[in-house]
C-alpha cells in the first residue's frame, strides 16, 4: 500500500495521547501536491538545480489551471491536517493562472480548516516586468480583499535571480504598505549567488537588503549557500530562514551548515508531503551526517510556531489531541478522519486532475 492508497484509519496517531499545538510547515508549495500521482520522470535525468527548475518545476507551474490547482490544494491541506500540520506558509506560482490563484488556495484552507499564510511568487522569467507586476498585484489584491478567518496574505518573490532590482524594491514597498512580510527563495542553489555577484552584490541577501525588499519577519527559504556572517545578518534584521532537508537532498543542492549561526530557523517541506515529523527526522539524519549538533538542528522543528506568530496572530489557534484537531472551536479532524471532506473523494479528484496536468505539461516546450 503506498502513501496515496491509505485510508484515514490507516494513518498513525502521532500525538502520543497529549494535547499539542499543531505543526507549522514554514515553507511549502501546495501546487506540487499532485506530483506523487504519477509525475512523469524527465528523460534524461536533469543535472543540477537549474535543469530541475527549467525541465520540471517551471513547466509544471506553467501548466497549472484553476481545476488542477484546486485539486492540488485540497489534497495538500487534507494530508497536512491528517499528519498534525495545522499551519502552512505557502509560496505559490502559476504563470498562466495568476489572477485569482490565491483565492483557490485560500478557499481550500478555509473549507478544510487549515491556517495559512499565502503569497504569489512574482517573477520576470516568462514575461518580464509585466509578469512580475501581475504577481505583485495578485498579492496586493488578495491581502486587500481576503476576509477569511484562517488565512492571511504576504508578498512573494520567486527568487532574486529571476527578478530585477526594481521589482525587489516594489515588493518591499508593497509589503510595508500592506503591513505584511515577503516570502522568497534565497541561495537555494549556486545560481542565485552567482547572479547576485554579477549584479555587484556579495550574495543574494545583501542584494535583497540593499533593495529594501525584506521587512522584519520576512521568510527566506533555503539559505543553503549563505555564509554564516549573512545568516547572522539575517537574524539581526529579524528575518526567518527555512531549512528544507528532504528537498535539499533530492535536488542535490547541499547542506546549509551556516544556518546554525541563527536561532531564527524553521522547518519546511518545499512541496514534499507536509508530514513535519518526517521532515524533522530527515533533518536530524542530515545534521548527523554533516557534523551539526542534532540538538541545534532539532530546534528548527518547533520554530515555525514563532515564525507565524506575527502574520497569523489574529487567526484562531489550533490544538491537536488523540485522533482530533480543533482550530478555534471547530473540529477539523475527528477520530482520525477529516471533518470537512471525504478523503476518497479528494484522492479521486487529485488523480483525475494529475492526469490533466501531465498532459498540459507535455504541450509546454
Image: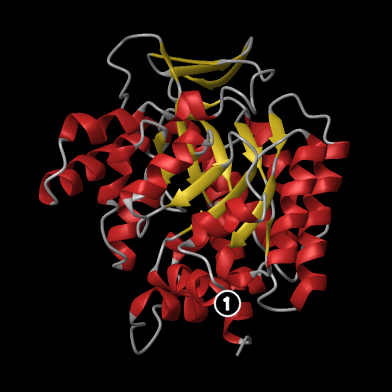
337 sits left or right of 280 in the view: right
Most foreground residue, 54 or 332:
54
Residue 169: % across, % down: 73, 56
Would you say 235 lies left or right of 136 here?
Answer: left
Name the image colouring. secondary structure
Image quadrant where one finds the C terminus? bottom right
Q: Position of residue 70 (x, y in %)?
A: 68, 52
Residue 85 vertical placement versus 270 (above, below): above
Q: Which residue is drawn at 50% across and 61% down?
A: 204
Q: In this view, does 295 lie to the left or right of 100?
A: left
Which is nearer the eye, 68 or 114? 114
Q: Is mark 1 on a helix, strand or loop?
A: helix
Q: Name the residue under label 1.
A: 59
Circle count? 1
Kindly identify the residue that appears in the image at 47 percent across and 50 percent down. Answer: 221
In the image, 188 versus 150, the foreground residue is 188
Residue drawn 40% across and 67% down?
189
Pointer 1: residues within 10 angstroms few (<14), some, or many (20+)?
many
Q: Is residue 186 visible?
A: yes
Percent across and percent down for residue 39 are 45, 71
Query: Is any part of residue 100 visible from this angle?
Result: no
Amino acid at each position: 500500500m503506498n502513501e496515496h492508497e491509505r485510508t484515514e484509519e490507516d494513518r498513525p496517531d502521532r500525538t502520543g495521547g497529549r494535547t499539542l499545538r499543531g505543526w507549522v510547515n514554514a515553507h511549502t508549495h501546495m501546487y506540487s501536491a499532485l506530483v506523487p500521482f504519477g509525475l512523469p520522470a524527465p528523460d534524461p535525468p536533469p543535472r543540477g538545480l537549474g535543469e530541475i527548475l527549467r525541465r520540471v518545476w517551471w513547466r509544471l507551474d506553467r501548466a497549472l489551471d484553476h481545476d488542477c490547482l484546486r485539486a492540488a490544494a485540497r489534497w495538500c491541506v487534507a494530508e497536512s491536517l491528517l499528519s498534525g500540520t495545522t499551519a502552512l506558509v505557502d509560496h505559490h506560482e502559476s504563470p498562466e493562472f495568476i489572477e485569482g490563484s490565491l483565492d483557490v488556495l485560500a478557499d481550500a484552507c478555509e473549507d478544510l480548516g487549515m491556517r495559512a499564510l499565502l503569497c504569489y511568487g512574482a517573477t520576470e522569467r516568462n514575461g518580464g516586468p509585466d509578469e512580475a507586476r501581475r504577481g505583485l498585484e495578485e498579492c496586493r489584491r488578495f491581502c486587500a480583499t481576503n476576509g477569511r478567518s484562517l488565512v492571511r496574505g504576504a508578498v512573494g518573490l520567486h527568487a532574486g535571480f529571476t527578478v530585477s532590482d526594481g521589482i525587489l524594491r516594489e515588493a518591499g514597498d508593497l509589503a510595508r504598505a500592506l503591513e505584511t512580510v515577503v516570502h522568497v527563495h534565497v541561495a537555494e542553489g549556486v545560481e542565485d549567488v552567482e547572479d547576485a555577484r554579477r549584479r555587484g552584490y556579495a550574495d543574494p541577501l545583501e542584494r535583497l537588503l540593499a533593495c529594501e525588499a525584506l521587512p522584519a519577519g520576512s521568510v527566506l527559504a533555503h539559505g543553503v549557500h549563505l555564509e554564516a556572517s549573512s545568516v547572522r545578518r539575517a537574524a539581526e534584521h529579524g528575518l526567518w530562514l527555512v531549512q528544507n532537508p528532504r528537498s535539499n537532498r533530492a535536488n542535490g543542492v547541499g547542506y546549509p551548515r551556516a544556518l546554525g549561526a541563527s536561532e531564527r530557523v524553521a522547518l519546511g517541506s518545499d512541496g514534499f508531503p507536509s508530514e513535519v515529523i518526517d521532515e524533522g527526522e530527515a533533518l536530524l539524519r542530515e545534521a548527523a551526517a554533516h557534523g551539526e549538533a542534532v540538538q541545534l538542528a532539532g530546534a528548527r522543528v518547533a520554530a515555525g510556531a514563532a515564525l507565524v506568530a506575527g502574520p497569523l496572530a489574529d487567526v484562531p489557534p489550533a490544538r491537536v489531541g488523540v485522533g482530533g484537531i480543533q482550530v478555534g472551536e471547530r473540529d477539523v479532524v475527528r477520530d482520525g478522519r477529516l471533518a470537512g471532506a471525504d478523503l476518497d473523494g479528494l484522492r479521486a479528484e487529485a488523480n483525475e486532475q494529475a492526469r490533466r496536468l501531465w498532459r498540459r505539461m507535455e504541450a509546454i516546450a
